[in-house]
Image (cartoon, rainbow, N blue to C red):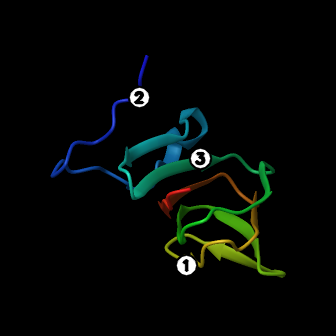
Amino acid sequence: MAIAHAAPGQLVDVQPLGDKLSESRNVALFKTDELEVIRLVMPAGKTMPSHWVKGEVTIHCLEGEISLTAGGQTRQMKASQLVWLEGGVDHALTAVQDSSLLLTIVLRKQ
């Protein structure tokens, strides 16, 4: 079954999940030929190994706390903080606390 993405002009709620965080899953909110937006749910201790994408990326910590390693530097991101990364930059995430993130990825053609 295909994941239902938001339609153009549709409002999408990205409030913190709060008590529902532990039962929530990752969801691609929408994807076009040029942009993808994902709500990523990371329980404490979960990691996303080092990787990179061609296009620019933003990571917005909606709730919780994550450790972000990017460009050889590690920093802690807390709720309401956002970071922008250039395309091609290796980055990795580790959830320090149960967290949800809003990821935007600019998609580059091969």
Q: Quadrant of residue 28?
A: top left
**Three-letter amino acid code at the position of disc 3:** Val
Q: Which mark is residue 110?
A: none
Sooner in the amino-acid sequence: mark 2 or mark 1? 2
Q: Secondary structure at mark 1?
A: strand
* Disc number lying in front (3 or 2): 2
Q: Residue furthest left?
A: 9
Query: Which residue does the image show at 79% across and 52% down from the upper left?
Result: 47
- The answer for how far apart the CA atoms under marks 3 and 2 are is 16 Å
Q: Secondary structure at mark 3?
A: strand
Q: Is residue 73 left or right of residue 83?
A: right
- Report the quarter where the C terminus lies: bottom right
- The answer for how far apart the CA atoms under marks 2 and 1 are is 26 Å
Q: Which mark is residue 41?
A: 3
Work out whether 100 lies above or below 4: below
Q: Which mark is residue 3?
A: 2
Q: Is residue 37 left or right of residue 66?
A: left
Q: Secondary structure at mark 2?
A: loop
**Three-letter amino acid code at the position of disc 1:** Trp
Q: Which residue is mark 1?
A: 84
Residue nearest the viewer, comparing 21 with 12:
12
- The answer for how far apart the CA atoms under marks 3 and 1 are is 19 Å
Query: Which residue does the image show at 41% across and 28% down from the upper left?
Result: 3
Query: Which residue does the image show at 50% across and 62% down from the upper left?
Result: 108
* Disc number lying in front (3 or 1): 1
Sooner in the amino-acid sequence: mark 3 or mark 1? 3
